[in-house]
Amino acid sequence: MNLKGNYQFDASSKAIWDCLMNPEVLTRITPGISRLEQIEEDQFKAIADVKIGPVKGSFEGNLKVAEKKEPERFVLKITQKSKIGNVSADVAIALNKKEDGQTEMEFDGKAKLSGLLARTGQRVLSGVANTLTKQFFKALEKELA
């Protein structure tokens, strides 16, 4: 499944970077995430409860921040496992400075799904991914305000 999009923020790339690199803030603003526990620098154990269409599951796995170039870009490497299937994703995130102190966040990546998740259907999963992405951006915007 492809993950691609962008969102415009009325904040500096440094302010956004600081939020995204703070595990407490990420836990608050990321839909479904109940806990992020730091394992080592830039690597976390992530626990999430997510409802995907008719399917609901608890996920546990790792989240790693790689290829960091502060405050411009990084790559999220995610592996999550649950009874309903597994998710593996690499998502490149870029923070592009715009005029008037605004920043555009772009993301581009791919997620590989297995188990019941993979059988749920691309259209349902894309809709859920879009909803969760919008919720994340709105929560980040509120956090920055």
Image (cartoon, rainbow, N blue to C red):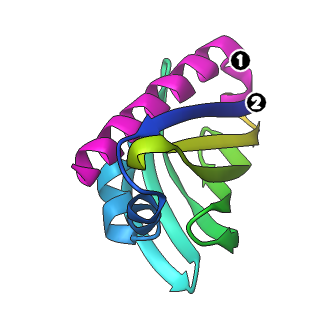
The image shows residue 136 at horizontal and vertical percentages of 40, 40
Q: Is residue 17 magenta?
A: no
Count the marks.
2
Residue bearing the label numbered 2: 1
Q: Secondary structure at mark 2?
A: loop
Q: For the view shown, which residue lies furthest in the top direction?
A: 123
Q: Is residue 3 left or right of residue 11?
A: right
Taking the spot 41% from the left edge, 68% from the top edge, the residue there is 18
Q: Main secondary structure of the magenta part?
A: helix
Q: Residue at x 66, y 57 (%)?
A: 78
Magenta stretch encompasses residue 128:
yes
Which quarter of the figure has residue 139? top left
Q: Quadrant of residue 1?
A: top right
User: Start and end of the magenta stretch?
Assistant: 117-145
Residue at position x 62%, y 41% in the image: 106
Q: Residue at x 71, y 17 (%)?
A: 122
Question: Residue 91: image x %, image y %?
Answer: 70, 49
Left or right of 10, for residue 145: left
Q: In the visual, does 2 lie left or right of 50?
A: right
Whole-percent x and y of residue 37?
43, 75
Please say if 120 is above or below 145: above
Mark 2–mark 1 distance (CA, rounded to whole Å): 7 Å
User: In the rendered structure, are the residues bearing label 2 and label 1 in contact, judged by CB atoms less than 8 Å apart?
Assistant: yes
Q: Give residue 122's mark.
A: 1
Residue at the extreme front of the image, as rendered: 100
Q: Is residue 84 above or below residue 93?
A: above
In terms of depth relative to the viewer, which is nearer, 51 or 2? Answer: 2
Q: Residues within 10 Å of mark 1 (few under 14, many from 20)?
A: few
Instruction: Report the amino acid beneath label 1.
Output: Gln
Three-letter code for the amino acid on which mark 2 is drawn: Met
